[in-house]
Amino acid sequence: MRPLLALLLLPLAALADGTKYSVSYPASDKPGELIFASTYNLWLPEGVKTVRGVIVHQHGCGLGSNKGAVTVADDLHWQALARKWDCALLGPVVQEPDKANCRMWCDPRNGSDKVYLQALTDLAKQTGHAEIASAPWCLWGHSGGGFWASIMQANYPERIVAIWFRSGTAYAAWQKPTDPTKARAIAEVVLPPEAYEIPMMANPGVKENGDKRFNGAWVDNLAMFKAYRAKGAPIGFAPDPLTGHQTGDQRYASIAFFDACLELRLPASGNKLRKIDQSKGWMSPLLGNEAKPAGEYSGDKAEANWLPNATYAKAWTEYVKTGSTADTTPPPAPFNVASKATADGVEVTWDAHADFESGIRQFLVQKDGQTVGRVPETPKNTFGKPLFQGMSYGDTPLQPLTQMRFVDKGAKAGSKYKIIAVNTAGLESR
């Protein structure tokens, strides 16, 4: 398969000293190939020498989900994770039309895995980083994206660093149904032993439990957790107390989870992932909210949550109690601050890295030590903490992307401008 479109996308907003690339593919009418057109947007940190992994943020089913996913590679907070570990950030966009059969892509055996692998190969060539084609993956999936990730786990376990299942898994669908006509059933999936070595987190919303439409997300994630844990898999269950099927503030927990797993699994060189030593992790009772080192846990470990380390255990405990995580450290200071006189006043631009723990809520613009503006003036987020980039139902920045730009109307050149970042904990950069 050759890309229909392969081009370098120029930034629509500040890209936090990185570069964005994109490849697109047409729909196919050939058996076993993806019947939907697709695009794969990838962001690379500035100056990265060797790409050690690919962080994949896979959207869910439906037209709204794939429309919202076009900004994944522009997400400043997910970029911070990629930058820390010299990884690429990849946002697949499967252009499923309204009311189409989502299983034709979220079951990767229908061709979406082939296009995904082709995209990695083509992006490797486009970026000049051949290692992208073979680098290991962190898989984040919402709803149908979690369904996709769970089957990718069966087919490519040796390539997966960790998986975050947000309100989605194919586990229940591949169980042999009593009724072979059961609508939710799919062809059987057999997990190889290597699949049970991948650290995972099941993350449904508490409000999905009993919901007429989304109860399956709760029930299936819980069933997957119990079955995998019984097999000894390093998996945890992290119910979001504030949400239903929307992604809410899970990013604060999922980014921290991948951070812990990347530390445990990435090799110093090459692509052979290191195995997890579960005895060095932490454990908590299923549906509990307190964790202990694995060596001190007295309950049945085959039924307990597995958590990768002490730092993540703290974040997980906060998240399952409050729906978010705490942060006591200030964000990094913005950089590349520049000002120029225009017909409307003085235009100030800057770049910034997101606070790793809590992202960016807002920027304060100071002139000669006095605050003269805020960007955005009133940060909003219908689904969670107010954010500089806003947030969609599926954990992606809103369009149009908010720019790191402020016009001090009527001002004249000569003043000194400073930009202060504010994270979602309300802490200011120094």
Image (cartoon, rainbow, N blue to C red):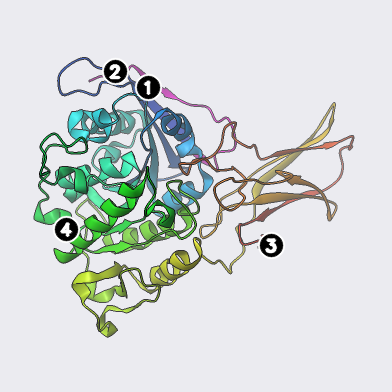
Q: Which residue is mark 4?
A: 196
Q: Earlier in the sequence, mark 3 or mark 2?
A: 2
Amino acid type of the residue tagged 4 in the rendering: Tyr
Whether residue 16 is in magenta: the answer is: yes
Q: Residue furthest top?
A: 29
Q: Which residues are magenta?
A: 1-18
Depth-wise, is mark 1 or mark 3 nearer the camera?
Answer: 1
User: Label 3's element?
Assistant: loop
Depth-wise, is mark 4 or mark 1 nearer the camera?
Answer: 1
Question: Label 4 to label 2, Cα distance in Å?
Answer: 34 Å
User: As rendered, which of 30 and 21 lies closer to the eye?
Assistant: 30
| 171 sits to left or right of 210 | left
Q: Which residue is mark 2?
A: 27
Q: Earlier in the sequence, mark 4 or mark 2?
A: 2
How many residues crowd around disc 2 within 10 Å: few (fewer than 14), some, or many (20 or more)? some
Question: Label 4 to label 3, Cα distance in Å?
Answer: 44 Å
Q: Position of residue 240 (x, y in %)?
A: 43, 58
Q: Residue at left 27%, top 78%?
A: 294
Q: Earlier in the sequence, mark 4 or mark 3?
A: 4
Q: Which residue is mark 3?
A: 430
How many residues crowd around disc 1 within 10 Å: few (fewer than 14), some, or many (20 or more)? some
Q: Earlier in the sequence, mark 1 or mark 3?
A: 1
Q: Which residue is mark 1?
A: 97
| 79 sits to left or right of 299 | right
Question: Label 4 to label 1, Cα distance in Å?
Answer: 34 Å
Amino acid type of the residue tagged 3 in the rendering: Arg
Amino acid type of the residue tagged 1 in the rendering: Pro
